């Protein structure tokens, strides 16, 4: 276990280092990437540019710039090139919003995926299965920016059932917090529910034909127990893996579209805004933030996987 | 004494896209306590379906049944699902062919056994767990207490089959159905497993139905033998009757395809030419006719299962040939029973 932990932490450091270098380099080579040009305003004169470059260290070689920037990341001195905001502070402010979105949506999509997957598997081939299958496919095919916009317009604006966009901290008003997040949760979950329930359905159908399920029946177990302890338990393993990875991605700010459509001002939306401004410091910090969660959840998935399937060993 | 199990004229048909598949087409079988009845036949002959049907495990929307299955004078074929569930595992237990896949990979073996005990008996959980340990010990698993908390992948194939047997015996069933219990195991382990079955017959006085295609196994432990072909019994009798005085050409073929160590090996191992008929469209009359070199006019008529050999009332077969003809034709060489390839004689 200790070896596993050490290896995973090492892995995490390597991934975060690689991701930061890549991000830094990409923003250095893309056209219009020169931050001094954008800082200097519309018609910069060369003297001004020179001063900015010297002041911010843009005249140094790339690796020195990288080193300086990374130092700032770890001392929390990182400042946005375009807004001069403290980046770490900003991520800190936005992270709870992203976490709230990720956690709620992950629970929602898992619960509904299991319910829908199990139901359609049991009803395989019948009308209700086909109907829900079509529904799931529609869910998979609907882009978040579209379904989100529709929800915002109808539920939020036209019918006024839920607030259309924005965020209220849970500490301020839990009920408002919940109401503001309901639509984002739903919009984000729809795609996942479609995908997960399809996978679970086919897993369940496969497992039902497994020999050990026949054994469970031959033992005279009640059908309910056969299903829950033998069929479902084995069918859920791949879903749990997938869930961990997707949860990690959303947690790390991956739900850019959902956050933006509903103006949650989470980390993902911050990423979108910063990329738009070609603002390297926040992009760099958010990328590392995301990488951290993805590697973290990968590790959690591995641990879960070993717990769920005794054939898997951590080392 | 009334038989433990009486299967009478059992029919099992599956409705498929290719038409009605008559997997079992008039199967009759009886089993006494302490008796081992072997059901032999090649894949698709209906032997496993018969076994599963006795357990009620073939029930489904596309399956239709005929005939009767009586266990201790109780009709099982039409029993409600819940009643059948209570019989399964407690009264009639089954072990399956492939021990590698027949155990739940993510559950400790002790729990898998205890689960069965709990499903049938009103005992506390730790008592069921204790029983699991005892059962594992009884089937010869060393350090049973520790091993009970292992997962199936931590056992070898033979050990897993022992776990299956321990599980099957955990509720003290009066009938054990063993569906190719030793097929997936290597020969030394096979012998050990068969030894367990033999023991069980003596200690628990259980009736055992042994489904197999391995005549070596049959010769080893069976009291009576039923030979199935295309969903029907083509020959039945005691072990000696079927092995030493086989009446049906299909039985000859089966016996002929055993490798023997006591005679010089033939250049090619004999096999029965052709393939079994599709169960959805079988030939008129004798089903074995298309593969049989001894076919004659009469064979287009359906031969009933009757005592034809004249050696006993229980030795029955479905072949129109006269006993004398059978006597003469079943030897392919001196001392070797077998079946020529179709066309080789004519």
Image (cartoon, coloured by chain):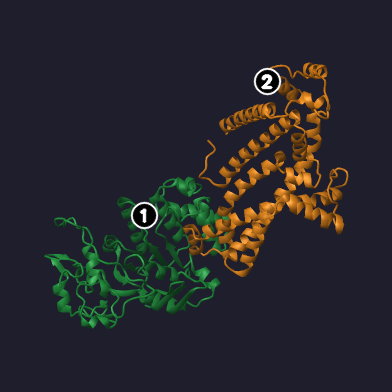
Q: Nearer the viewer, mark 2 or mark 1?
A: 2
Please name the residue that numbered disc 1 is placed on.
B184
Please name the residue that numbered disc 2 is placed on.
A62
Find residue B277 and report its image quarter.
bottom left
Quadrant (top left/top right/bottom left/bottom right) for the C terminus of chain B = bottom left
Look at chain B in the picture and name its colour: green
Left or right: residue A241 compared with residue B309:
right
Asked if residue A2 is positioned above or below residue B5 in the image, the reply reads above
Residue at the (75%, 28%) spot, across then down: A281
Tell me the element at label 1.
Answer: loop
Tell me the element at label 2.
Answer: helix
Residue at the (14%, 55%) spot, across then down: B264
Q: Position of residue A62 (x, y in %)?
A: 68, 20
Which chain wears orange? Answer: A
Q: Position of residue A172 (x, y in %)?
A: 88, 43
In the drawing, what numbered circle is on residue A192?
Answer: none
| Viewer can see residue A78 | no
């Amino acid at each position: 276990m200790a070896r596993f932990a050490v290896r995973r932490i090492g892995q995490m450091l390597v991934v975060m280092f690689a991701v930061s270098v890549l991000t830094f380099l990409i923003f250095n080579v893309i056209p219009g990437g020169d931050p001094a040009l954008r800082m200097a305003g519309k018609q910069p004169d060369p003297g001004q540019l020179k001063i900015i470059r010297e002041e911010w260290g843009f005249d140094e070689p790339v690796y020195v710039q990288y080193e300086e920037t990374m130092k700032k990341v770890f001392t929390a001195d990182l400042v946005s090139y375009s807004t001069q905001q403290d980046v770490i502070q900003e991520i800190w402010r936005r992270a709870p919003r992203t976490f709230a979105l990720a956690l709620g949506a992950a629970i929602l999509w898992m619960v509904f995926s299991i319910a829908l997957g199990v139901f359609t598997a049991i009803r395989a081939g019948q009308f209700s299965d086909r109907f829900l299958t079509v529904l799931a496919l529609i869910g998979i095919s609907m882009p978040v920016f579209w379904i989100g916009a529709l929800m915002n317009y109808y539920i939020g604006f036209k019918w006024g059932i839920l607030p259309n966009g924005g965020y209220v901290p849970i500490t301020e008003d839990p009920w408002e917090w919940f109401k503001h997040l309901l639509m984002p949760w739903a919009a984000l979950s729809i795609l996942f529910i479609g995908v997960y329930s399809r996978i679970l359905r086919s897993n369940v159908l496969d497992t039902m034909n497994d020999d050990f399920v026949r054994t469970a029946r031959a033992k005279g177990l009640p059908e309910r127990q056969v299903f829950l302890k033998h069929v479902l338990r084995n069918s859920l393993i791949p879903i749990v893996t997938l869930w961990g990875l997707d949860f990690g991605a959303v947690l790390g700010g991956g739900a850019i579209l959902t956050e933006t459509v509903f103006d949650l001002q989470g980390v993902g939306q911050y990423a979108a805004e910063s990329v738009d401004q070609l603002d390297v410091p926040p992009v760099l910090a958010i990328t590392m933030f995301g990488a951290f969660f993805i590697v973290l959840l990968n590790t959690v998935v591995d641990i879960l996987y070993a717990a769920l399937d005794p054939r898997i060993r951590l080392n | 004494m009334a038989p433990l199990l009486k299967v009478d004229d059992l029919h099992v048909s599956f409705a498929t896209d290719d038409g009605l598949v008559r997997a079992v087409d008039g199967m009759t079988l009886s089993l006494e306590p302490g008796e081992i009845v072997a059901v032999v036949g090649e894949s698709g002959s209906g032997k496993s379906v018969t076994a599963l049907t006795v357990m009620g495990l073939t029930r489904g929307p596309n399956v239709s049944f005929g005939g009767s299955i009586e266990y201790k004078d109780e009709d099982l074929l039409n029993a409600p699902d819940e009643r059948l569930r209570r019989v399964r595992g407690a009264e009639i237990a089954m072990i399956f062919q492939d021990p590698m896949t027949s155990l739940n990979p993510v559950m400790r073996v002790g729990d898998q056994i205890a689960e069965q005990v709990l499903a049938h008996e009103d005992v506390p959980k730790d008592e069921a767990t204790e029983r699991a340990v005892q059962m594992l010990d009884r089937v010869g698993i060393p350090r049973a207490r520790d091993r009970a908390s292992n997962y199936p992948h931590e056992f070898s194939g033979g050990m897993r089959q022992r776990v299956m047997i321990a599980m099957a015996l955990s509720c003290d069933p009066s009938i054990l159905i063993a569906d190719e219990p030793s097929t997936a195991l290597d020969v030394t382990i096979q012998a050990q497993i068969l030894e367990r079955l033999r023991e069980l017959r003596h200690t628990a006085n259980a009736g055992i139905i042994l489904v197999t295609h391995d005549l070596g196994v049959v010769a080893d432990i069976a009291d009576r033998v039923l030979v199935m072909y295309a969903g029907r019994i083509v020959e039945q009798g005691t072990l000696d009757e079927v092995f030493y005085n086989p009446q049906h050409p299909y039985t000859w073929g089966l016996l002929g395809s055993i490798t023997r160590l006591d005679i010089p090996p033939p250049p090619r191992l004999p096999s029965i030419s052709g393939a079994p008929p599709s169960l959805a469209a079988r030939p008129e009359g004798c089903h074995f006719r298309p593969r049989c070199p001894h076919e004659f006019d009469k064979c287009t008529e359906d031969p009933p299962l009757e005592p034809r050999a004249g050696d006993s009332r229980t030795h029955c077969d479905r072949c129109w040939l006269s006993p004398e003809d059978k006597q003469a034709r079943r030897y392919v060489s001196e001392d070797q029973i077998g079946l020529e390839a179709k066309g080789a004689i004519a």
